[in-house]
Image (cartoon, rainbow, N blue to C red):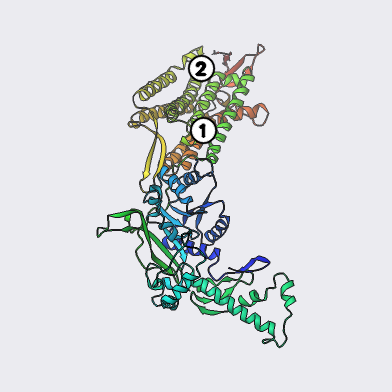
Amino acid sequence: KISRPPIYILSAKASADEYHRADALMRYLVSMGRTHVTLVYSNANDDILKVTSKAAKDHQVDLRVERYTPPFESKAPNSPWDAMRRVKDSGFRTVILAPRLSGDLEYLAQGAQDLGINTDDYLWLLYDNIDLDALISSSNLSDPLDKIISGMGSIRVLNGFDWRQEDVFLQAWKENNAEFVSRLNIFNPIEPEQPGYFFAPPNYFQEEQYPPMSYSSFMYDTVIALGMGACRASNILSGKSTGQPTPVETKLHMPGSNLQYNETIKVQFQGASGKLTLDNGFIYTRDPETLAFGVYNIRPKVESSDPLEESKHEYEYFLTSTKLPGEEWSETGTFVYAGGLTTQPWPEREIFQNNYLSPGVRVVGFSLFAIGIAINLIVAAWIFTHRKKPQVRASQPVFLGFICFGSITSLITIVMLSFDESYGVSTGTLDVMCAASPWFFFLGYLIVYSALFSKLWRVNKVLSFRRRVVKAKNVIAPAFLLIVCAIIILIVWTSSDPFVWVRETVNEETGETYGGCASDHGMAFIIPLVVLTIIATYLAGLMAFKCKDISQEFAETRDIFTAILTQVQVWTIGVPILILVDTVSVTATYIARSLLIFIFSVSIVLLIMGPKILDSFGCCSTNNSKRGKFSTNQQGNSNVHVSGLNSSTSKTMVSITNNEYH
């Protein structure tokens, strides 16, 4: 950088600025089709976080950032090991490492090995803040670090000699002779036998093992730019450019007005690194269109003719892709990934799509359950408090109570369907919930329709004069038989092949799973249970039809027909939808099941009891022009006047007490 004292933050840079380096990295990843990336960075590299996040946003890359801090040796929160754990949890298989020092890589690599993510399923990239030569020359690389370095890539700013076949700077470098090397050795500030001392051989500049170091061409251009800026400043001070010399005091005492800096940022020339042009007007960054970027691929050295015999702890790197000034990324060689593969790891992200039931969706189910329970409890409380009133006694409170009970029983099924592993529920508990679901649903369904059938049959018997006294126990035999048959089937099912919780992989490539209740021979039990529910529905509908000419106070046939028709429509539409979305969308499946159960449980109760409750508040009236009219005697018992007898003068009354129809 070329800083302007005393405001050091205002500086020019002959190389790529931090953002343009991150931008080149994101452009390269997008060109590969990798748009799900994790950045693991040290707490000392917040500047890298800022520019990388900005570049990722600009190129629509889904970037996750994982920060690590000391202590490095532990598995404490925010340690390198913990950062690797979060990388694994994210499922992103493109990982950029931006450590503070190369030594941090050992801890990151150890965490990757412990967590099993240092495999050839991942693409590891090293940010350009770590020197590649220093990294691969280290003789202390651990086995874990070996595994993530092999096949690693790093995007760097290129010197001209890195990609030009005939580079003037490199040619001038090699023309330095032994006399020049001797002078350099003399001026070496490090004494012999001291750390860092190096004695260059006479042919140093001609040896392939001593190429120019990274950023050499940029350092050279920076020096040239400073010299040109100094010349321009000198001309201004001497008055050669304006005719009037500028006082030195002006330069010295005005903060930020460093004349050499101001003139340096104006220079433009074709340098060793390309055309040097500074823009932006504030921080004067290098024009990115004049820069070249490249991808270096780190590979194990091959020490024999057999490419499979690779040395351990010794690496070299090769330029495999370039982005030349004004151009897009293009390949210049073969990138060898981890495991010796020449095709990039795919898929780019590990889809931990376990299709868990989201909390937001579960709220819908629990809300429907709560609403359904509240409605049933309110109706049941109203029935109990009004049980002695003639209108309620005529509707037979016992059976109305069973309808509410069956409705609540079915609603519990929603709770049984509202849990999976994501809520900390064990597989054993989920197995119990799966096995209990058909018990609650089918028994609740049969209780509701059996109560409806028995209620209507009892009324029909009384008003058909088949018996003088019809007690509740006289009409529950068919309902009892249906429920007993269902219980027998459920017992056999639960004891032999119950529903259990199973999570299956539905996509081997992405690892997507789907959890749910399953039974090997479940249909063998579901079909007879469905047949029983159809029988119960048919019997209730048939009895409602026979009682169609009975007053609404007794039979509620119109409301029952409406409820049955509503439920038939819902099941006709809902069941095919359930079949279509099953194992496709856990959200759609759960909502569809919850709605079906809710509509079934609530519609019967509201359609039968709703009019009665409204009538008690004077909101509606009932037409009693059908068979069986109400009156109340002095003792408070309800009498039903039956019309339709042969003699116009005869009158028959049916007395209704608490437990009997007379």
Q: Nearer the viewer, residue 132 or 59?
A: 132
Q: Which residue is rendered at x = 52% and y = 24% of the image?
A: 403
Q: Secondary structure at mark 1?
A: helix
Image x and y of residue 447, in percent: 47, 23
User: In this rendering, does residue 505 appear at all?
Assistant: yes
Residue 149 position (above or below residue 159): above
Image x and y of residue 148, in percent: 40, 52
Label 1 vs label 2: CA separation?
Answer: 24 Å
User: In this rendering, does residue 558 appear at all?
Assistant: no
Mark seen at residue 462: 2
Disc nearer the start of the sequence (1/2): 2
User: Type of residue at label 2?
Assistant: Val
Q: Quadrant of the N terminus?
A: bottom right
Q: Nearer the viewer, residue 101 or 514?
A: 101
Q: Residues within 10 Å of mark 2 (few under 14, many from 20)?
A: some
Q: Is residue 382 left or right of residue 102?
A: right
Residue 128 position (above or below residue 441): below
Q: Is residue 44 left or right of residue 89?
A: right
Q: Nearer the viewer, residue 466 or 305?
A: 305
Q: Nearer the viewer, residue 321 or 542?
A: 321
Comparing labels 1 and 2, the label whose residue is closer to the camera: 1
Determine the image quadrant of residue 48. bottom right
Q: Which residue is rendered at x = 30% and y = 55% of the image?
A: 310
Residue 306 position (above or below residue 422): below
Question: Mark 1 sits on what residue?
Answer: 563
Residue 407 position (above or below residue 269): above
